Amino acid sequence: MALLVQKFGGTSVGDAERMRTVADNVARTVRRGNQVVVVISAMGKETDELLRMAREVSSTHPGREMDMLVTAGERKAMALLCMAIADRGVEAESFTGSQAGFITDTVHTNAKIVDVRPDRIRAALDAGKVAVVGGAQGVSTDQNVTFLGRGGSDTTAVALAHALGADLCELYTDVSGVFTSDPRLVDDARKIDRISFDELLEMTAAGCPKPAMRSVEYARTHGVDLHVRSAFTWEHGTMVSKEADDMEQAIISAVVHDTDEAKVTITGVDDRPGIAGQLFRALADALVNVDMIVQNTSAEGRTDISFTVPHGDAATAQATCEALQRTLGATGVTTDDAIGRVSVVGAGMKTHPGVAATVFETLAANGINIEMISTSAIRISCVVAEAELERAVQLLHTAFALHDGPALVD
Ligand code: ASP
Ligand code: MG
């Protein structure tokens, strides 16, 4: 007998028929002799709908009330799923985040878990019931309902799997697993059978939309094995676990991309100690979240600094730089919105030389200019013009023959 946490995303429970299909699967899993805890998201686009309603009724959105509102989506879904499961002769009980023992900090709309005390979930399981838990929610240390943020249900599932000592956490979604690239861009993108926490974490940080990055971080920290799979075809998906020493390492596992950032450049700043410190302190004080940073070699005591920020922070970043322009001796500040970032990720590149060279040569051979580069031990990212991004992704996917299956490090 295994203890499984099964998380179902919004599209998986989008309407009554989907609810019944999910209930069928839960009942089937129970009949095979497993204990099951379900974590459920709000149905379909319900969370967006609730946010839209909030905007419609008011321009004032206090965090406490927003969290009370948004968590209602999951509450509705969990009760409905319990009814559908009961129809199949299996007992199920629903639990809010608070009832399930999720204690969070007091940061509304994006709360962080500080403790999980799933006593009531254990009791339900001991009584032979399925526990259905509302995702992305908890109760704060000052006793208010909190929301863990968009994609928070993934984190709920992983945290619960850890707290219960579950055998596996299954994240059911509308795709059949983690792919070597976005299948909408790359025709021959392939489903990955196994991947390490580290690689998936790099992928989610570089634009892979699912699972939510925070949940992958949590899984890595606590060693919670994941199975990312489809609630539509129920086929075997992608297993995510610690990189084992005897596991064959793919040189490159995936090519991911994002278009969420803009590039800000401040030109002609003085090249002397303290300039970067002043600039990035001012940006930090303005709560701008800086990602990639490049400083050019200087010519005649002057240099350019470019950095990327989320689109939403670009205007603040531009204004902050302009305010500092004189102090820094800068000649200008520009923002480029039309950039994209392509990243190749693979644990095998740690021991395999030439990956960076192949990335740069491939882009060069196809006339794609690289505007910025950043790397980690297992990732190489290039910023290119947004108009070239799709082609860059396709070219790199082909260059590393990812359609063929992973090239392994021996
Ligand atoms: N329903 C919420 C969202 O759409 C949270 C979640 O289920 O992950 O972001
Ligand atoms: Mg953009």
Image: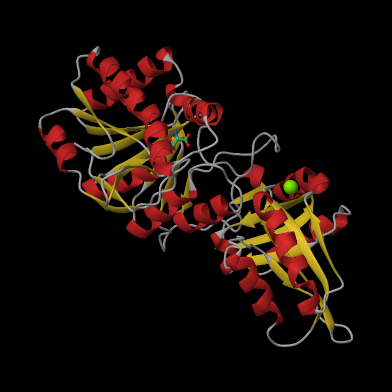
Q: Is residue 221 left or right of residue 91?
A: right
Q: Position of residue 316 (x, y in %)?
A: 68, 57
Where the N terminus falls, by quadrant?
A: top left
Q: Is residue 38 left or right of residue 164?
A: right
- The picture quadrant where one finds residue 17 is top left
Q: Residue at x 47, y 30 (%)?
A: 47
What color scheme is it? secondary structure
State whether residue 351 is above or below residue 34: below
Q: Position of residue 259 (x, y in %)?
A: 70, 47
Q: Residue at x 59, y 50 (%)?
A: 406
- The picture quadrant where one finds residue 134 is top left
Where the C terminus falls, by quadrant?
A: bottom right
Q: Residue at x 42, y 28 (%)?
A: 42
359 or 209, which lies in front?
Answer: 209
State whether residue 118 is above or below residue 382: above
Q: Is residue 378 left or right of residue 269?
A: left
Q: Is residue 33 left or right of residue 210?
A: left
State whether residue 35 is above or below residue 192: above
Q: Position of residue 263 (x, y in %)?
A: 75, 58
